Amino acid sequence: MGIKDNCRNELRAAVRHLSDRCLYSASKWAAEQLVGIEQDPAKYTPSHTRFQRGSSSIRRRFRTATEAAFTSTPVAGVSHVATPPVLEDDNEVIDSDFYLLAKSYFDCREYRRASHVLRDQTGKKALFLRCYALFLAGEKRKEEEMIELEGPLGKSDIVNHELVSIERELSALRKIGNIDSFCLYLYGLVLKQKGSDNRARTVLVESVNSYPWNWSAWSELQSLCTTAETLNSLNLNNHWMKDFFLAYAYQELRMHSESLVKYENLQGTFSFSNYIQAQIAKAQYSLREFEQVEVIFEELLRNDPYRIEDMDMYSNVLYAKECFSALSYLAHRVFLTDKYRPESCCIIGNYYSLKGQHEKSVMYFRRALKLNKNYLSAWTLMGHEYVEMKNTPAAVDAYRRAVDINPCDYRAWYGLGQAYEMMGMPFYALHYFKKSVFLQPSDSRLWIAMAQCFETEQLHMLEEAIKCYRRAANCNDREAIALHQLAKLHAELGRSEEAAFYYKKDLEIMEAEEREGPNLVEALMFLARYYKAQKRFEDAEVYCTRLLDYSGPEKETAKTLLRGIRYEMDVEHLPP
């Protein structure tokens, strides 16, 4: 049996196991990867295959030279666990009547009734559903109390009151070794909510090693791996699901090249996985490769036209590129598909923001947060809108809520820096800019923001600003700010040679990109004067001549410089 057949059989069984235990999110993920495996052409003709696209061409586009450097686990699809073990309770062909009733209650969101029905059932399957239903009942009550006390977007210390009893029961079962992988997953979830991160990691590792097909367990484990050191310390069995986990974890740790290599390997088996395509797009988005991201999302929408997951990121790309018509079309599309999804609200919010209707944009971001108050991008985007509206206290509150949810979100730290800079508090701003560049050192915009903070009157730390602009110039400064500012600062400090070096580099880039404007004029003027002072008259004359093409005061200055240059050249040629 081939690698693809092994993966297919494992995922088919996993979809059933997870769905039977009401882990619908994990079941959906497994089913999406199942149909992402290329079908046997002998069994499936093209007319029966939903995915007909040139994903191989996209895969080639994302190959990197570092591919061989990151192969800590075998190539995707090489499974070290043969097929899913037959779970103990799955030996029963028919579930008990009580379990079927409890599952029906669970599906109707009557969690306490589901838990009560299973109070006398002893099977592991029934035990998990009883504890899981109780956990969700506690979560539901917690949300209700928070809304009653603080409103839908309020902050509160209210906890799930069922955690203690669930932890006590599952801890006792684990001690005697009478606990399965699903209850271990729930136990890890409880420990995480109680703040016992180290114990939660240990328990979740046990869960995924015992049953590697539960993506929900992998996702919770990833959220507890906030550093590469923590990730590398995990004692995980080799299995192709580990590759999915590592690719996802690398991405969250901003190790985008490593993540792309992993997803490239996985595409060898899961050639038609929309999930993998979306994750590649996320990594490319973080690397600011917007053209490539747009190509992937367009293809995703062609093959899955009612998809909403990750489409808010696509809207961010369209917003950055100022594609009004494309963003309008996307907003209309998701509105018709499901307007009460957080992603849909964020897309519509981006649309109104691009139109300059910031109040309406904030309304949609708030709607997204009412649907999911932990939706990170909505808090960050709402902070950006408040900055545009000059409502800095509200912006600071939104950004703080974002970093409370995810302390590794560099955009929120950057937003806080911007807000405090607007309030004329550069020391606070600098603190937050430093946090943002620590999290995303490859983003030139963050280094430029920090450099501009160093340049303020209160700080006036020009040497530090120069260091930041140098870092920005080395980080693919698309806005072409860093080189010009380096030239100006060196000129201000009387370092003419360094200033000329950076003005010349900036001038070369502006010429290559055919850009005009005051920066071009400034560079030509400085270089003309610099070379005249250096008695390199021919070079100075070239720059002066170019300035004659302009109609402003620089033209008269260039004429004066040319007269001076020619006079000095004539003096040089006079006989002694």
Image (cartoon, rainbow, N blue to C red):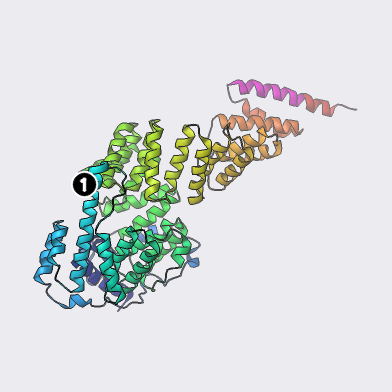
Q: In which quadrant is the N terminus drawn? A: bottom left
- Work out whether 485 lies above or below 28: above
Does residue 472 show up magenta in the picture? no
Q: Could you tell me residue 568's position as x and y percent?
A: 79, 26
Outermost residue toward the left in this view = 97
Q: Is residue 196 left or right of residue 151?
A: right
Q: Amino acid at mark 1?
A: Asp
Asked whether residue 329 appears in the rendered view, the answer is no
Q: Could you tell me residue 271's position as x and y percent?
A: 33, 64
Q: Residue at x 36, y 77 (%)?
A: 80
Asked whether residue 470 appears in the rendered view, the answer is yes
Q: Is residue 100 left or right of residue 301?
A: left
Question: Looking at this view, is 338 or 270 the one in front?
Answer: 338
Q: Which residue is mark 1?
A: 338
Question: Looking at this view, is 387 or 304 the one in front?
Answer: 387
Q: Is residue 14 left or right of residue 508?
A: left
* Magenta stretch bounds: 551-566
Q: Could you tell me residue 494's position as x and y percent?
A: 70, 34
Outermost residue toward the right in this view = 576
Q: Residue at x 26, y 77 (%)?
A: 85
Q: Main secondary structure of the magenta part?
A: helix
Q: Could you tell me residue 318's position as x and y percent?
A: 36, 42
Q: Quadrant of residue 100?
A: bottom left
Question: Looking at this view, is 131 or 102 the one in front?
Answer: 131
Regarding mark 1 in the picture, which secondary structure is present there? helix
